[in-house]
Amino acid sequence: MRTINNIILISMIALAFCFTSCSSDDGGKQPMPIPSDSELSIGEEPIMIKIGEENKVELEILQGNGDYNVFSTNENIAKTEITDAKIMIEGIKMGNAYIVVSDKSDYYVKRPVSVYITDVLELEETELAFEAGIGKPASATTKITNGNGGYKVVSDNRKVSVSITQEGVITVSGAAENADTEITATITVTDALSLTASLKVRIIPTTNPYTQVEMGEILADNTRRYFLDDVDQVNSIWSVTFENKVDNGKITYGWNYYSYNHLITFSGDKSKGKKTDALFNCYNYADRKFITYVNQPITLEIANNDGTNIWAVYSFTDQSGVSHRGYFCDTIEP
């Protein structure tokens, strides 16, 4: 009987303990465990940085676990540092790199960085005008003075062609169609940052055989030479005999080599200015073809006489209607 009473007593104590525990359970809800760390998160916007210490960019850490580290995959392009829990990025040289951020829980994120030079694309000049002969292409150049590289150019007029070098030198070329009409175009320049600039172009027709730019180049060289249609008519392997003489009031310049020759005669003297009765005789093999002219009338002008040398330019239209031009430089005295 005593045994039964002991069993009943133990059961009542256990039941009382159970009720006491449940009553202190705050409705039976258990608290959620607190996470030991959280995933690292930083700003998502594209990181564009202008070169220069004064243009540093701050990268925001949105979420993380402290003890942050950061490095750049190319410190020649972008450098990074952490100051007062702030990530600062400085652009060193134009280009692309990545910055990598990590925290004490070994979370890390990687973001692309683009470093650029300038916010404005600038040209040396915004208008470019030059002369061109009728059907004779001429060109002029200008350059970019401030830009981000990766340049592209396009002309809105197919009669005006344009090209650009990696260094930003722009070359525009075209020919006049007639003596009365200028050719115009707008050149649009774009850089790697999609900045744009415009260049207005005017091609001015001229009836002179050479443009002012070309004449400047011709007159800057005092070596003896004879050109026709931009081809040197003196074969470098021939020992030609140069002509510089006066016969019966006619001045003759040029050269002979056996049956080959290139001779220009005119009346008057060797002073600057247009000359009369000018004729061109030529039998030559140049530019992979034979060239033959017999007493071809030409328009001839002595462009300069510096007391030692003369420079003369000439032009003519042959029997088939094709225009030609040429020039020579030689000594005044035989």
Image (cartoon, helix red, strand yellow):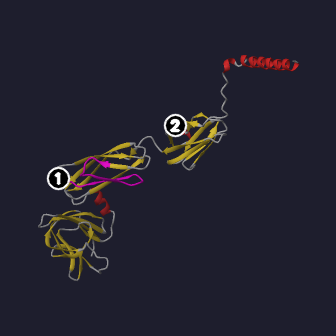
Residue 243 at what x, y percent from top left? 24, 77
Kindly indicate the quadrant of the structure image that contains residue 321: bottom left
Is 213 displayed left or right of 14 in the figure?
A: left
Name the front one of labels 1 and 2.
Answer: 2
- Label 2 belongs to which residue? 44
Residue 235 at what x, y percent from top left? 29, 76
Along the line of sight, the residue nearer the viewer: 200 or 188: 188
- Among the two numbered marks 1 and 2 on one chain, the one whose residue lies closer to the N terminus: 2
The residue drawn where x is 54% and y is 48% is 77
Which range is magenta?
Answer: 154-179
Residue farthest toward the front in the current orientation of the protein: 1
Q: CA distance from mark 1 to mark 2?
A: 60 Å
Q: Quadrant of the C terminus?
A: bottom left
Number of marks in picture: 2
Magenta region includes residue 51: no
Residue 329 at what x, y percent from top left? 28, 69
Marker disc for residue 227? none
- Label 1 belongs to which residue? 179
Is 219 displayed left or right of 194 in the figure?
A: left
Q: Secondary structure at mark 1?
A: loop
Magenta region includes residue 177: yes
Q: Secondary structure at mark 2?
A: loop
The disc labelled 2 sits on which kind of residue? Answer: Glu
The disc labelled 1 sits on which kind of residue? Answer: Ala
Q: Assess disc 1: are there few (<14), some (14-19) or many (≥20) residues with their C-alpha within 10 Å of its C-alpha.
A: few
Residue farthest toward the right in the current orientation of the protein: 2
